[in-house]
Image (cartoon, rainbow, N blue to C red):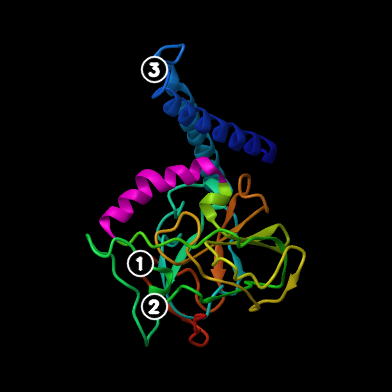
Amino acid sequence: MSEGVRKLAAVAQRVLWLSFFAQFVVQHFVGLPYNYWVSWSPLLGAIAISVVLSRSARRRIETAPPAPVEVEAPVTGRWSALNSPADKVPSHGTHRLGQSYAIDITAEPAEGPARPAPVWFWPVARRGEAYPAFGMPLHAAADATVVHAEDGQRDHLSRSSLVGVLYFWLIESVGRSVGGTRRIVGNHIVLDLGEGTYAMYAHVQQGSLAVRAGDKVTAGQVIARCGNSGNSTEPHVHFQLMDGPDLETARGIPFHWRGVGVPANRETFTVGEEAVPVP
């Protein structure tokens, strides 16, 4: 499937979702001038597009799997992996937004306060500062050019309880999907690593950018800080490689972190020296 077709499909899908939710709201105030079941057609159309795009991405991976690209790890210190492509592909359950081989990692310092464990009821949510990942430096994975960088969205509270998780899945994630790509990934950075490879860092901390579009960066350079913006239940780093700078049309590329590899779910790994979050 060509990039142009993927872009058209992404736009059509967003329009269909917006149409469905608009009808859902309007019908609570006035009667729709057509059968109730017709109002569900945009939803079915959006789902159909998702299925087609997913099958296309799966066929591409099965017939011509992309080769892994070795880069530096985007963090230093002691971390653990979540939603890793070492366990399944697509790692996040979708090929959308170039996420086929994406990984989430969260800080697990050997000393100091530990990462809070999820709870059933209380506290309903926690501030970002309660998590050791919040404010940790993000490093350039290679010598690169900054293609996109933004950090204007707020860092929200964690979704650390049953109520928080239900709110996240049933309300927030749906709203962010309708709001578009920026609302899903939150503050983010896209780096052009050359040779058709791009790195994307999502959920960046508000106001933490150390670079801007057009800047040249070197491997290991601090480019921002870990935050909790966008579609995120707690402060963590979302990292992925992809074949283009546009998240709506990009396809995922496997990564291999130099000296680390691809950590599996819940695997703890250490990179360099222990980093310290910004107070």
The residue wearing badge 2 is 108
Looking at this view, is 98 or 207 the one in front?
207
Q: Give 170 or 222, whichever is nearer the viewer.
A: 170
Which residue carries the number 3 mark? 37
Query: Residue at image x 34%, y 49%?
Result: 167
Measured from the top left, where is residue 242 in percent x and y? 61, 56
* Circle on res. 126: 1
Mark 2, secondary structure of its residue: loop
Q: Magenta stretch containing residue 168, yes or no?
A: yes
Counting residues from the N terminus, which is met first, the one under dot 1 or under dot 3?
A: 3
Calculate the distance from the C-alpha at mark 1 to the C-alpha at mark 2: 17 Å
Magenta-span inclusion, residue 175: yes
Residue 51: which disc? Answer: none
Answer above or below: position of 180 versus 117.
above
Precedes in sequence: disc 3 or disc 2: 3
Q: Secondary structure at mark 3?
A: helix
Say which element carries label 1.
Answer: loop
The image position of residue 116, as x and y in percent, is 32, 72
Q: Residue at x 73, y 60 (%)?
A: 195
Q: Are marks 1 and 3 in contact (CB under 8 Å)?
A: no
Using the rendered image of the protein, determine whether residue 15 is visible from the camera's viewpoint. Answer: yes
Q: Seen in the image, is 25 located left or right of residue 145? A: left
Q: Which residues are magenta?
A: 161-180
Residue 251 rendering spot, x and y as whole percentages: 60, 49
Amino acid type at image mark 1: Arg
Give whichever of discs 1 and 2 has the lower sequence position.
Answer: 2
The relative height of residue 138 versus residue 251 in the rendered view (above or below) is below
